[in-house]
Amino acid sequence: MTQDRIVSSIKDQELVAKRRQQIVQGAVRLFREKGFHRTTTREIAKECGFSIGTLYEYIRTKEDVLFLVVDSIHHQVRERLEEKIDLQNPSAENFIATLESFFRLMDDMQEEVLILYQEVKSLKRESKRYVLEKERLMVGMLERVVVTCMPDDISPQDARLLANNLFVQGQMWGFRRWILQKQFTLDEYIERQIQFLLPGLGIVHKGREL
Amino acid sequence: MTQDRIVSSIKDQELVAKRRQQIVQGAVRLFREKGFHRTTTREIAKECGFSIGTLYEYIRTKEDVLFLVVDSIHHQVRERLEEKIDLQNPSAENFIATLESFFRLMDDMQEEVLILYQEVKSLKRESKRYVLEKERLMVGMLERVVVTCMPDDISPQDARLLANNLFVQGQMWGFRRWILQKQFTLDEYIERQIQFLLPGLGIVHKGREL
Amino acid sequence: MTQDRIVSSIKDQELVAKRRQQIVQGAVRLFREKGFHRTTTREIAKECGFSIGTLYEYIRTKEDVLFLVVDSIHHQVRERLEEKIDLQNPSAENFIATLESFFRLMDDMQEEVLILYQEVKSLKRESKRYVLEKERLMVGMLERVVVTCMPDDISPQDARLLANNLFVQGQMWGFRRWILQKQFTLDEYIERQIQFLLPGLGIVHKGREL
Amino acid sequence: MTQDRIVSSIKDQELVAKRRQQIVQGAVRLFREKGFHRTTTREIAKECGFSIGTLYEYIRTKEDVLFLVVDSIHHQVRERLEEKIDLQNPSAENFIATLESFFRLMDDMQEEVLILYQEVKSLKRESKRYVLEKERLMVGMLERVVVTCMPDDISPQDARLLANNLFVQGQMWGFRRWILQKQFTLDEYIERQIQFLLPGLGIVHKGREL
DNA sequence: AATGAATGAGTGTTCATTCAT
DNA sequence: TATGAATGAACACTCATTCAT
């Protein structure tokens, strides 16, 4: 478990895992609402349904909560993304399908992604480094999809840039919802983004062709 | 002045403007370094070269400082962007040149954009609404460039989405620098992003054509 | 046992005694290092090798631990001192030998004596009274040595004062070690202190006489 | 001022001095009663007649208060002791008179001395070192008196030990008052201690001689 | 108009103690 | 008997804001 980075004074490891899950759950709800800084450790404890003392049996500092949250979100995103990725049967269709899945995932997890987005900066150097490394891995997943599925004329560098673009476009649906979600439905958004993308890759897609 | 939204007990409006400029200047430096929440009003006052009491003659709450900062950054970006935009002579070349200017601007102001990016959420509802409205205007500028310069087969909706994509790609250079600026020089970044974009718009650009 | 002053929920008196011995042992080590206030009950339990729950089966409050410790130290000091005292053969030599033993004992137990010294004040009234009573007994032992061994022209009051002086000079070797143990070896310290003392008692001692 | 070691955010140095005097005064009262650890910063603030916020304008940590207190006590003791010391006219009488003054001073300041005594250990390394250095200076004062006033056959080492003995006998009057002050009046205590001392120094004093 | 000392609610964190298992 | 998870009162310290000068 990646969470071993955070020390707990509780011995029962199963309990630790369970309580931390609760903590993440409660904290996400609060961080969404008011952000990390405006959320109190007491509020977190209350939201989780236990006392402040108990909270501190499972973490050492408030920042640990943020780390737990961020780590958990990353974990979920990667897990769910991995399910969708099929590198065995590379094809343009497969690529498009993966993209769609990715966008839908980002829609589904927009609140969490927002937190990822806005609060990572509040982590201390060491944790931040760790978290960014994880994000690199996630972008790497998209990158691999690009490299695998695309006609071979795309350079590794371009693949990486593309992956970053896609990654941010996915996040953008959430963090710019105030402008995007008023203009587009999710389906439209996905469709249009894919349409913009394909020509640059030399693909001609059904949806738009005619 | 948009800053009229913030009340000061000082009568001399020129002085108010001057002091607030100082405030923004000092605050930006600090917010870059430590973010809004970790910056103290005392520190702001000190950085500005006056006392905490004086600071509070020109603002009412700490949040006012953030608003001033965000507003000022927006203002600068828009102003500098406006200089670059030439809607009189629409053409693909013009479009590309504008994009390049935009990306360079975003590079130049990455620190400020980061603040915009990470701290707007800390504004209260009312201020946030106002700020987001301003951002809408900025995206609108890009949108207009797209609409004006592009072959007429692009729909208004697509123009808006494109503008958002571009806007975020500009920001992304700054807020994902830990990954992008290790892989690309600014010139490369601009070049590749434009290359990805053009085919989707039906343009064939020099750099890549053959 | 004097420890009956502290209530335990455990019935088996032998076990209680054994556990308390463990507690004292562990606590002394910790109190030396960090003092009573900076030592945690959890740390004490851990040092003793059992759980916090178990610790509280044998004591009722943290203060009880301190009492146990202080009482135990007193006990040891008295026991070891008693061994050395020989009231059957009073003489100046005997007196001097006893003093020397006493100083050596105080050197040997300086850490413990330091605890006695610095933490007794943290006991509550009742316990403190009890502990001070014990200390009175210890001083009484020295007093008796003085009275017994000394040429009879020393008054009871003077004997008591003298005993106090000696007692404190013994402790002082430990609690002022930062100044004394840089200047003197133990042997020197003992020798000099005794030399200062004797003339006041009308004794002429070998070491110095000529 | 030695208090420059502690940083304050208040600019007016006179005010700082005044407030810190208040702090010392209030804190001494509380430390006497309940010791350093059992005294709350809020209690200190209240005792001083200002708010917790104000207290922290003049110190940085609770330990600073202790340092201020200890330093102030040392300062007073030294000052008052210095007044009494007359190195210009060395003589046994002068020596005895100085001792008497010293004992009376220690009686007068017993509460403060007790604090010095019991709480210095709670200071952090650096402060403790500083404080012990000051104490060394104080012992040095007594030492000089001994050296100056005494018949020249006393060695420097013996002078130092003697000074330490005297110093501790002075303190002892306070910290062992539960036993000493029940047996002796101050005058008696002084008289007896001096009587014990003199023969060791080769002096024959009026009081006892015949 | 400028200053900076004063305020106190609020924050993260600790730790002695309890009690169900 | 032994365990250790749970508790929450209590603590040191911060900082936005006010207001008398």
Image: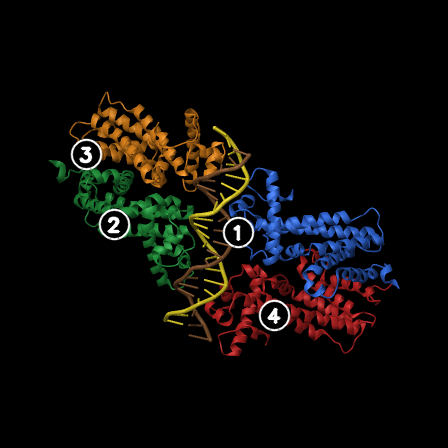
Chain colours: A blue, B red, C orange, D green, E brown, F yellow
For marks 1 and 4, give the CA distance.
34 Å
Q: Chain of mark 2?
A: D
- Give the side of residue A154 with respect to residue D208, left or right: right
Say which amino acid is labelled 2. Leu
Say which amino acid is labelled 1. Arg
For marks 4 and 2, give the CA distance.
66 Å
For marks 1 and 2, give the CA distance.
53 Å
Which residue lies under the disc numbered 1?
A: A42
Say which amino acid is labelled 3. Gln
Q: Chain of mark 4?
A: B
Q: Is residue B98 visible?
A: yes
Q: Chain of mark 3?
A: C
Q: Could you tell me which secondary element the residue under label 4 belongs to?
A: helix
Crowding at label 3, few (<14), some or many (≥20) Cα neighbours within 10 Å? few
- Give the side of residue B37 with respect to residue D192, left or right: right
Label 3 close to label 4 by CB (< 8 Å): no
For marks 3 and 4, give the CA distance.
85 Å
